[in-house]
Amino acid sequence: NAGVMQNPRHLVRRRGQEARLRCSPMKGHSHVYWYRQLPEEGLKFMVYLQKENIIDESGMPKERFSAEFPKEGPSILRIQQVVRGDSAAYFCASSPLLTQENTEAFFGQGTRLTVV
Amino acid sequence: KNQVEQSPQSLIILEGKNCTLQCNYTVSPFSNLRWYKQDTGRGPVSLTIMTFSENTKSNGRYTATLDADTKQSSLHITASQLSDSASYICVVSALRDSSYKLIFGSGTRLLVRP
C-alpha cells in the first residue's frame, strides 16, 4: 500500500506562471488536506477536500489559488500567476472516514515550489 | 480562536539525554491530539495520537501525555539519539459539523548533538 504520493517533489516557476501540484492519497482514503509551510515556519492549513467536494477552504487565499479532488485521479492544488511569496513547501495529507475519533492522517513528502 | 502553542521553539541536547516538549491548545471542540515528527525536507510522520480519555501513550522512546482539563500535552523523549534531530509538531483536531480539521503548532526544533 503506497503512501501519499506528491509530485513533483520540486517545482520551479517564473513569476506569473502557473503551478500545478498533485497529490495521490493512500488507497482507500477519500479525504485530502493541503498545507503550506513557509521556510522556518509551521504547517498552515489551506483546504480540505472530499471526492468532488470542497469541505473547508478557509485557509486558502481568495485569489489565484484553487483546489480540486475529482472522482478519478489525484487532487490538484493550482496556483495561478505565481509570485515570490508563493515559494514554500506544500504538503498533502489523506485520511479515511472523517468521523472516527482516531482517524489517522498520513502526509506526503511535499512539493517544494520555488518562484524565481 | 483555535490555537496550538508549543515550547520551546528550539532545543539542543546531548545524545543520550532525555527531554520534554510542551504543547498548550485552545482548540474546541477537541477531538484528538497528535504528535508528529518532521525530518528536514520530509513530510510529518505520526508518533502518537491520543483521544480525550487517554492520559498517556508510548511509542518506543517517545511518551506523550495529555491533560484535557488544562489543555496541555507533553512529549518526552528518553535516551535521545542523533536521529531524533527533527521538528516535533503538536497537532490538535477539531470535529465540527462533520468537518475534520487539523490545527498545527509551529513545532519544536530538536537538535541532538554527539
Image (cartoon, coloured by chain):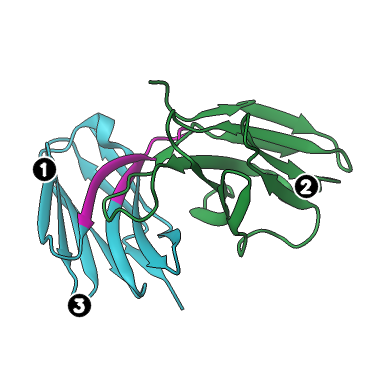
- Is A88 drawn above or below residue A110 in the view shown? below
Chain that the image shows in cyan = B
**Residue drawn 24% across and 50% down?**
B49
**Within-10-Å neighbours for mark 2: few <14, some 14–19, many 20+:** some
Q: Which mark is residue B70?
A: 3
Contact (CB < 8 A) between labels 1 and 3? no
Residue A69, which numbered label?
none
Q: Which secondary structure is most common in the magenta stretch?
A: strand
Quarter placement of the C terminus of chain B: top left
Mark 2 vs mark 1, CA separation in Å:
41 Å
What residue is pinned by disc 1?
A: B78
Which label's residue is closer to the chain start, 1 or 3?
A: 3
- Seen from this angle, which residue lies furthest top? A1
Q: Which chain is green?
A: A
Specify the subunit that label 3 lies on.
Answer: B
Task: From the viewer's perspective, tell me whether residue A28 is left or right of residue A70.
Answer: left
Q: Decide which of A94, A72 is in the foreground and name it.
A: A72
Asked if residue A84 is positioned above or below residue B114 in the image, the reply reads below
The stretch of residues the image draws in magenta is B35-50
Amino acid type of the residue tagged 1 in the rendering: Thr
On the rendered structure, is A96 left or right of A61?
A: left
Give the secondary structure at mark 3: loop
Q: Position of residue A80 (x, y in %)?
A: 83, 45
Which corner quadrant of the image does residue A115 belong to? Answer: top right
Q: Which residue is mark 2?
A: A84
Which residue corresponds to the image point at 73% horizontal and 50% vertical from the top-left? A66
Residue in the foreground of this view, choosing between B54 and B63 = B54
